[in-house]
Every structure is written in structure tokens, then in C-alpha cells.
Amino acid sequence: MPASQGPFADQPLLESAAAADREQATAVAELFKVLGDPSRVLLLRTLIEGEELCVNHLAESIDMSPSAVSHHLRILRTAGLIRFRREGREVYYRPDDEHVEQLIAVCVEHVQHR
């Protein structure tokens, strides 16, 4: 029997699938680390409920200092959860896409279900 048809013929394919699974699991874990801070979850929920908001409006909405809000927004932006646009000196933030809303909604539903 040729080696390409033996019992280990698919081993490189299995190893690459396992590596891909590990990479994906690591990416998901990193996402949950970002969501592990209640302030970031509040910021995301506020952005989901509203339209585009600037740092000062977000800070007022969740009773947090603008500098703390900016810090958390940078982390959310780096994680790909929000996007921004500039208008003069103001920067406006919004969720990156509908997946962010779905992710938060499923997490809230799970917490309420327990």
C-alpha cells in the first residue's frame, strides 16, 4: 500500500486542522478577555442602543471619566468590536457590525437564563 493511502495519510491535514482550531480558540478567548470588563460591556451596550456617540456622551451615559472611556474604547477598537469616524475634533464611535450586537445579546440572554 502506498504511503499516501496508509493509516497516517491524513496526519498532516489533521495537524493543520488542530492548529487552526487552537488559533481560533485563542482568538475567541482573547475576545472574551476584552469583554471581561464590565465597563467595556456597558460601553458596547450603550453604543448598540444609541447611534454614534463621542467620548463625552459615552462618559456621561455610563458615569465614567472621559479618559477612562477613551482607554476602554481603544481596547474595543483594537479588538475589532467598534469603529470610529472623525468629524473635526470629535471622534464618534459605533459597533463594528451586527455581530457585536448579536454577541452581547446572546451573552445577556445567557446570564438572564441562569
Image (tube, helix red, strand yellow):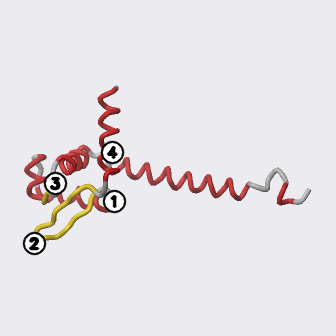
Amino acid type at image mark 2: Arg
Which of pointers 3 and 4 lies earlier in the amino acid sequence?
3
Q: Which residue is mark 4?
A: 102
Q: Secondary structure at mark 4?
A: helix
Which marked residue is nearer to the observer: mark 2 or mark 3? 3
Q: Which residue is mark 2?
A: 89
Q: Position of residue 59 (x, y in %)?
A: 11, 53
Which of pointers 4 and 2 lies earlier in the amino acid sequence?
2
Give above or below for 36 relative to 20.
Answer: above
Q: Nearer the viewer, residue 99 or 91?
A: 99
Which of pointers 2 and 1 lies earlier in the amino acid sequence?
1
Q: How many marks?
A: 4
Rate crowding at label 4 as few (under 14), some (14 to 19) or many (20 or more) other CA atoms within 10 Å.
few
Q: Which quadrant is home to the N terminus?
A: bottom right
Q: Position of residue 83 (x, y in %)?
A: 26, 62
Q: Secondary structure at mark 2?
A: loop
Which of pointers 1 and 3 lies earlier in the amino acid sequence?
3
Q: Which residue is mark 1?
A: 80
Amino acid type at image mark 1: Gly
Residue that lies at the very extreme toward the top in this rendered image: 114
Q: Secondary structure at mark 3?
A: loop
Which of pointers 2 and 3 lies earlier in the amino acid sequence?
3
Which marked residue is nearer to the observer: mark 1 or mark 3? 3
Amino acid type at image mark 3: Glu
Q: Which quadrant is home to the C terminus?
A: top left
Q: CA distance from mark 2 to mark 3?
A: 18 Å
Q: Which residue is mark 3?
A: 51
Q: CA distance from mark 4 to mark 1?
A: 15 Å
Residue that lies at the very extreme toward the bottom in this rendered image: 88
